[in-house]
Image (spheres, grey):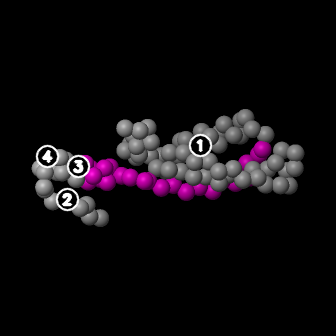
Amino acid sequence: MTHELELQLKGYGLTTAQILYRMPDHPAFLQTYIWQHYDLAPEFPEMKSFLKFWQETLEGPLHSVRYVHRKLISASDWRAQGRVHHQLISRPGAKQFTPTG
């Protein structure tokens, strides 16, 4: 099992942030940085940690951060897929289970 799949099964979703920051030598200009990582909503510990690192380490002051978050799979999706796999292996010729909802 991949690390990403493990995170998704633990409730993590993919968070993408558009970070606007001021250029250190030209503060009137804004630059864009795109950050993407698996994170937990609504606390967003990974994104908050990254933004803290940015403010403490990098010279370009933050202007604004816009983000979106999406769970790619849920535990119920995983269980439904597991049932399909189990039926096809344990009972050859069994009808395929189609999850609803």
Stretch of the chain drawn in magenta: 60-82
Describe the element under mark 1 as helix, strand or loop: helix
| x and y percentages locating residue 68 in the rendered image | 55, 57
User: Which mark is on residue 32?
Assistant: none
User: Which mark is on residue 48?
Assistant: 1
The answer for how far apart the CA atoms under marks 1 and 3 are is 38 Å
Q: Contact (CB < 8 A) between labels 3 and 2? A: no
Location of residue 46 (image quadrant): top right
Residue drawn at (36%, 52%), measured in percent from left and top?
74
Q: Residues within 10 Å of mark 2 (few under 14, many from 20)?
A: few
Q: Earlier in the sequence, mark 3 or mark 4?
A: 3
Residue type, mark 1 in image: Lys
Describe the element under mark 2 as helix, strand or loop: loop
The answer for how far apart the CA atoms under marks 1 and 2 are is 43 Å
Please state which of the two labelled residues, at mark 4 or mark 1, is closer to the viewer: 4
Residue position for label 3: 85
The answer for how far apart the CA atoms under marks 3 and 2 are is 9 Å
Residue position for label 4: 90
Any magenta on residue 67?
A: yes
Q: Is residue 45 left or right of residue 64?
A: left
Describe the element under mark 3 as helix, strand or loop: helix
